[in-house]
Image (cartoon, rainbow, N blue to C red):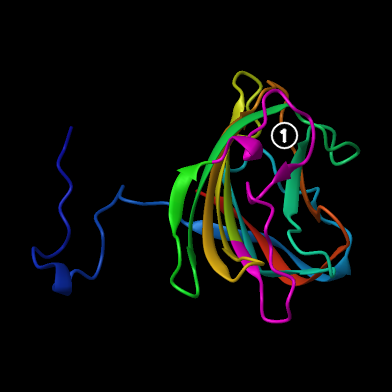
Amino acid sequence: MAVLFANNNSLSAITALPSGVSGGAMTLLSTQTASSSATLSFTSGIDSTYNEYVFKCINIHLGTSTANNDLKFNFSIDGGSNYNVTKTTSSFTAYNPEGGGTANLGYRAPGDQAQSTAFHDTSPEGTFGVENDECATIIMHLFAPSSTTFVKHFMLQTQIYESGDYSESAFIAGYCNTTSAVDAVQFKPASGNIDAGVIKMYGVS
């Protein structure tokens, strides 16, 4: 196999990559903006064009007075008619309080699912803050959703301004236990509406 060289040996002076070198470009495919929305759904654009899709949930604020709310997600294999794909997952969280009290890092069994078709929490603790300045940001990766041979792996990280004034980072990973193509994704709160926020879907080449 031939070795590819850039046009200059100094990294600061490289102006072009050699032919055949490329990497992970992200293409914005769709944007959903919440405004007291019961759900945000992506029902088109998830196909065999890309082997990885990324969903960026930015400044998600849940519009309910109920503390410990959560944004949930699920997948569909019928274009969004039903969001009930069987999932198995694992999760852990790290958190630290504003007041400098007890911090923690640990596995969160209540945040897992085992062959469940239910909507899945983006936070194992279910602790989204609902004050005016509290919000969450989430990045979810979905891999090879159009495969009809393998299960569909996904993973996400959620960063929350938590209802008890904590910074909480949640990490969740799992798989959709289906060999049918996943072609739609929906996000919705456990209760109430998504008061504000944006979710963007990207394809990764």
Circle 1 Cα neighbour tier, 10 Å, few/some/many (<14 / 14–19 / ≥20): many
Specify the quadrant of the image occupied by residue 33.
bottom right
Residue picked out by circle 1? 182
Question: Foreground residue, 191 or 39?
Answer: 191
Residue at left 31%, top 47%?
20
Q: Indicate the quadrant containing the N terminus: top left, top right, bottom left or bottom right.
A: top left
Q: Is residue 54 left or right of residue 132?
A: left
Looking at the image, residue 162 lies above or below residue 88: below
Main secondary structure type of the part rendered in magenta: loop
Looking at the image, residue 16 lies above or below residue 105: below
Question: Foreground residue, 124 or 178?
Answer: 124
Q: Is residue 46 left or right of residue 161?
A: right
- The percent position of residue 172, horizontal first and vertical second, equals 56, 43
- The percent position of residue 26, horizontal first and vertical second, equals 52, 57
Residue 124 belongs to the span the image colors magenta: yes
Looking at the image, residue 172 lies above or below residue 200: above
Specify the quadrant of the image occupied by residue 194.
bottom right
Residue 149 belongs to the span the image colors magenta: no
Farthest bottom residue? Answer: 132
